[in-house]
Image (cartoon, coloured by chain):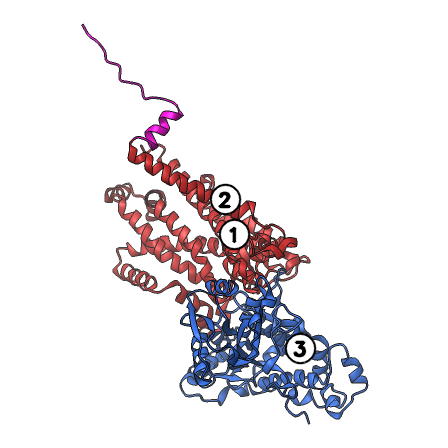
Chain colours: A red, B blue
Amino acid sequence: MSTSVVPPLPKQGFGNWLKKHFFSTWLNSVFTVIFGAVLIWMCIKLSNWAILDAIWSVDNKEHCGHGAGACWAVIQDRGRLIMFGLYPYEEQWRSTLACLIVILTIGLSCLPSFWSIKKLPALWVIGFGTFVLLMRGGFAGLPLVTSEQWGGLSLTIFIFSAVFVLGMPLAVVFALARRSSLPVIAKGTGLFIDLVRSLPLLTILFAAAVVVPLLVPDWLEGNKLGRVVVAFAVFFAVYQAEIIRAGLQSTSQGQEEAAAALGMPYWSLVVDILLPQAFRNTLPSTINQAVITFKETSIVTIIGFFEVMASGNAAIGGGEWTEQFVEVYVFLALVYFVFVFGLSRYGAWLENRMRVGHA
Amino acid sequence: MLNKLMKLATAASLAFAGATSAQAQDEGVLGEIKARDSLLCTGHNGSYLGFAEVDAQGEWQGFDIEMCRALATAILGSPDKAQIIPISWAQRFPAIQSGDIDVIIKVTGWTMTRDTELGLQYSRPYFIGPFYVMSRSDLGAESISDLEGGVFCVNAGTTVERVLADYMETNGIEYQPLAFEKGEELRAALYAGRCDAIAGFGPFLSSTRVNAPNPDDFTIIGDVIKLEPEGIVVRQGEDDFLDVINWMVTALLLAEENGITSENVDEMKANPPSATVERLLGVTPGVGTRLGLQDDWAYNVIKTVGNYGQIYDRTVGDDSRYKLPRGLNNLWNNGGLLYPLVLD
């Protein structure tokens, strides 16, 4: 005689879910009630401040600062300054377009179908070329806008993506060089990486912007924005190189030996076997580094570039909107959030995708 | 390359010895400006109240910006030839040594260290930077001594706190200091009526006043508790350029002293009331050629930018939102410290 015991089915329904996760013991219930109340109270406060009591239009400016609500009129009045910095007012459509092109380029290069040694550089050359041509102008009836006047969000995105695109190949070179079997190259690169890492980013950028013109001949001086981007890229590369090196070390020695036994050339070994694994293994740290770099672009304000943070400060520094600094900073935080959150989600998607077939 | 090395060498040698010789002979920055057809001036990395701000259109405006435009007009004939380079406070001295900018017009106080050790040269002060006290209007105070025993709100650990303490001690006025960590807290306390008065740099006080729920509740008292003479800065050895700057400032002051404004300058030029005005506006030649400029440079400056008083009123004075009193920045015959040099 055999009786089969059926395991009890988990109870279904919202009520049970709620009970299981929030009210399972009396202590949990107490916490749920307390934190729920605090959360609701904060939501009400926040929505009152940000939406219900807020002042949206410049016409109502005189009510700003005296009530409890946010004064979004400052964004209406100074929004274009925050987004475009010192870029000439009539030409700001160019900045918008250039910004969209770079975002599109970033978006496209995130798609795995573009990941080839030919497509990716071509995409970036076209994307960046169009950006610089559009921003700079000086042809076909577009007035010339020098890079001193570039600003706002498009400058932030330009600096970030240029640093990333220049820094990434450089990082690969550094990582490989540090693992080189030739001691001079390996030690030399190691020393360079440690040296750059021991300097603060601010010092490096300040030196690139201010000290380099004193030291190098005119023809090598280039433009200030270019120098800053290159210096920033080197800084990014030394950190990223260590991340990639960690990835390279995580591949087993046997694979290199097997490749050598098959007579694969060095570059094929690196491009086809080592780097794909290294990048996959270090994806979380790479995204981490990208996020940090995006946020660090605001440091360029100290050498006189009007990226989005500096433009925000310019908007509230003029006396007219001095009291609305909270609103402007909240707006800036949202702008940063959109990009950083996007980056993180992309990283998560990429990880998921790479896990397929590697269970 | 040679030029670069020269610059570096002078920057280095000046930093140590304060030598002046070599550099002035070659080209000079005045020649570079004319060849480039633009004047590179300091802006700010953000907005600095009343002196260098960016408006909603992303255009620069403010007192220092106007001075730069006046200088560009004097040398190159048009205010549009001034190119404003955004530059932070820390960056201004290295930037002028590296040639990123031609001139610093950025509320830069004339101090001995800067003048002697940084390889810089100052023009005569074009602005007297005042520290004032602002009090509640209902107290009816007309001078700081009327505020005896009052509560003075200050930012903790700032220059202003020291400056105020020095002034009060020197003048034997008792007061109760109330320190705040942040500017916002200080303002909130002031608006809430917790302070009888606050002290600070003129434009800061003005903007605090303008942003008050009711600006008339607060009055800036005329007593200056400290002043800082602000000069225009060039590299050491740029004597010709410095001459132009000094005479540009004088032209603005002379114009105000003689009642020449951007509106009536044409009439004045047609019927000059005095020999000085005649010389200033280039009716009798000499005002330009001796500086290596056009003879009508001063006329152009006054026509396009206005006289000193007009610039002041428009940017920080009565016609601006700051309403900063003229005070020490008045001409000598109106109780101020400013005076033109002699145009002979």
Q: Residues within 10 Å of mark 1 (few under 14, many from 20)?
A: some
Residue A107 is marked as 2
Residue shown at the point (31%, 19%) measured from the top left:
A9
Q: Quadrant of the C terminus of chain B?
A: bottom right
**Is any part of residue A133 visible from this angle?**
no
Quadrant location of residue B130?
bottom right
Q: Secondary structure at mark 3?
A: helix
Q: A222 above or below B267?
A: above
Mark 2 in CB contact with mark 1 (< 8 angstroms) = no
Q: B127 above or below A57?
A: below
Residues in magenta? A1-24
Left or right: where does residue B204 sit relative to residue B267?
left
Quadrant location of residue A21?
top left
Residue B76 is marked as 3
Residue extending farthest to the left is: A1
Are the numbered discs 2 and 1 placed on the same chain, yes or no? yes
Residue shown at the point (64%, 69%) measured from the top left:
B320
In front of the other: A183 or A22: A22
Left or right: where does residue B158 sit relative to residue B145?
left
Q: Which residue is mark 1?
A: A331
Residue extending farthest to the top is: A1
Are the numbered discs 3 and 1 placed on the same chain, yes or no? no
